[in-house]
Image: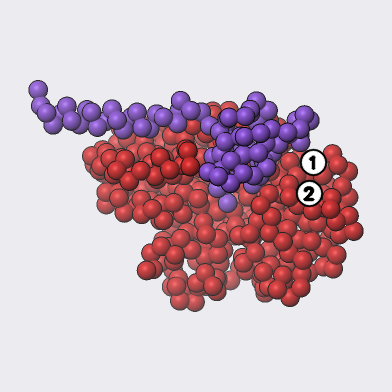
Amino acid sequence: MCLAIPGKIISVAGDEPTFRTGKVDFGGIAKEVSLAYIPEAAIGDYVIVHAGLALSKVDEVEAQKVFEYLKRMKELGELEEAGP
Amino acid sequence: MKYLDEYRDGALAQQLAAEIHRVATKPWTLMEVCGGQTHAIIKFGIDELLPKQVTLIHGPGCPVCVTPLEKIDQALEIANRPGVIFTSFGDMLRVPGSTTDLLSVKASGGDVRIVYSPLDAVKLAEQNPAKEVVFFGVGFETTAPATAMAVFQAAQKGLKNFSMLISHVLVPPAIEALMSSPNCRVQGFLAAGHVCAIMGYEEYPPLAAKYHVPIVVTGFEPLDILQGILMCVQQLESGRAEVENQYARAVRKQGNQPAQHLVREVFHVVPRKWRGVGEIPASGLGLNSAYATYDAELKFGVTNRRVDEPADCLSGLVLQGQIKPHECPAFGKRCTPEHPLGATMVSSEGACAAYHRYRLR
């Protein structure tokens, strides 16, 4: 039920904040989505969409952190294996 | 798809699982709150990657599953009325009421329609001025902003033929109810990421402190869930009980303020009955008096319906994490997705349906 999917805003329409919408591309399928809750959302942003409304803007820096953590862990592991 | 596929990388998942094996020295029992997480855990076999001493139990976070029987009966009664277009998310259609379900009402000629968004129901009301359009507003804090926006837009447009049957529920009161139960085995929580995308996580530190449980806001992809489990186990092993955010790419501490603002404009907190659990104080949302004309219960005069739940369905124990689905005597026998006794077998996010789909092969 709380399924929400990230997609990229490819166009924006409407001036009135309550009715502002964007076309969001989900890997090739585009859907019209309400942007009422993300007033700062602009073309090119990734947003997380649930039930036809964008709920959150994806933070690109935070999105990379798990991969950086895993990379560091792997390097540490390799260092330990190599010994002093 | 970007921000989805890379979080399903098998080798990285194994690396996280290996780290959990390394860190976990004692038995720990964690609960994932959200049904979407339960579905992902069983689908991707995440529980099978974990060391034996780390147990996941599945929480009450499936709104379809906890919608009380009388709400389903109210929905059926309204959907059967002539001149009504009854709209709902698809997963509510097969949830059994006392005698039938919405899909059967549709099959026997009722105008029941699946919509992707409550905003689509508002459009239907605009396009069908001679009909009464009703939306079945179920869901957690994630979905409440969508239903609130639908009511608000309907009011802005002056629509008189739109209303909502509301059964919204809230996550923190459910966690509190679980933790205060003497049978509670949960030592750490993976909090529901999309609920927190709306609400933030400032409500959780008092809960973490009161019950001395770590709470890790967690996403929905395999790497998210494994990292959430790792963070939770690291806290438990070091004796900490803090609130941490694994899902920072989508969740900010304060949540989505415009969404919270509109939810408060349209709804207020009410006591709510949870199917299989019973009434939990201050655990749901109801329409504010300024929006009472959009309340389908009042419009169609279906308030005060109370019915008892079937005794041979143990979904309440499943929802509280006290038994696993396959431990119910009816599981896979008298209760299947085709003929469900309770809602946990209906919704794809229900723990029983997930076990039936992925574990009975």
Q: In which quarter of the image is residue A52?
A: top right
Kindly indicate which chain is depicted in red in the rendered structure: B
* Local crowd size for mark 2, using a 10 Å CA cut-off: few (<14), some (14–19), many (≥20): many
Please give left or right for residue B33 compared with residue B72 in the image: left
Q: Mark 1 lies on which chain?
A: B
Location of residue B180 with respect to B204 vertically, above or below = below
Image location of residue B255, percent across then percent down: 59, 31
* Residue at which label 2 appears: B122
Kindly indicate which chain is depicted in purple in the rendered structure: A
Q: Which chain carries label 2?
A: B
Q: Which of marks 2 and 1 is nearer the N terminus?
A: 2
Please give left or right for residue B137 compared with residue B294 in the image: left
Marks 1 and 2: in contact by CB < 8 Å? yes
The residue most toward the left is A84
The residue positioned 71% from the left and 36% from the top of the image is A21
Query: Are callouts 2 and 1 both on one chain?
Result: yes
Callout 2 amino acid: Val
Callout 1 amino acid: Gln
Which quarter of the rendering shows the C terminus of chain A? top left
The residue positioned 78% from the left and 56% from the top of the image is B134
Location of residue B72 with respect to B46 vertically, above or below = below
Work out whether residue B309 or residue A65 is closer to the camera in this orientation and state it.
A65
